[in-house]
Amino acid sequence: MITAAKRLQWKPVYDQPGVTMNMPTSTMDSKQKKHLKALGHGLDPVVTVAGNGLTKTVLAEISRALHDHELIKVKFAVGDRELKQALIAQMCEASDCQLVQQIGHLALIYKANPDAKPNLTKAR
């Protein structure tokens, strides 16, 4: 079973005058991350973040999906790269989850849950 830290550490990854964007630093080792990437390869996106951004309902659905599945894909249908990076960072911070991988418009995120439903979760 993959165990993850309860709190994430954040580091600045994009600095511009007046703008600082933080992304989570991974507390997983490369073996755990590789395992989660392999599990996430066949997953379809559970949630899509579009023009309205991260609303309360979208964050609630992400939290519910993470509680049930532990490992989910989220699709970002926003055009701007910097906006997408900011939304991913905001989602990880608000959901207290870890970014496993981001490719294109998809983000694979993980949050450990010892009470996850065994028939729904793949992160074991």
Image (cartoon, rainbow, N blue to C red):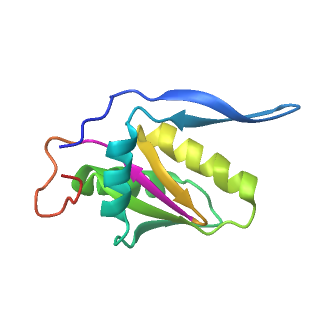
User: Relative to residue 114, is residue 119 depicted above or below?
Assistant: below
Q: Residue at x 26, y 49 (%)?
A: 67
Where residue 11 sits: x, y (%)? Answer: 61, 28
29 sits left or right of 67 in the view: right
**Residue nearest the viewer, comparing 49 with 44:** 44
Where residue 7 sits: x, y (%)? Answer: 39, 27
Q: Was residue 22 drawn as part of the magenta stretch in this picture?
A: no
Q: Residue at x 16, y 50 (%)?
A: 116
Main SS of residues in magenta: strand
User: Relative to residue 120, is residue 55 depicted above or below?
Assistant: above
Where residue 50 sits: x, y (%)? Answer: 60, 67
**Residue nearest the viewer, comparing 31 with 105:** 31
User: Relative to residue 121, is residue 8 depicted above or below?
Assistant: above
**Residue, far right:** 17
**Residue nearest the viewer, comparing 69 with 64:** 69
Q: Residue at x 73, y 67 (%)?
A: 79
Give the total of numbered labels: 0
53 sits left or right of 79 in the view: left
Magenta residues (range): 106-112
Residue 55, quarter of picture: bottom right
**Residue, far front:** 31
Residue 46, quarter of picture: bottom left
On-image quarter of the N terminus: top left
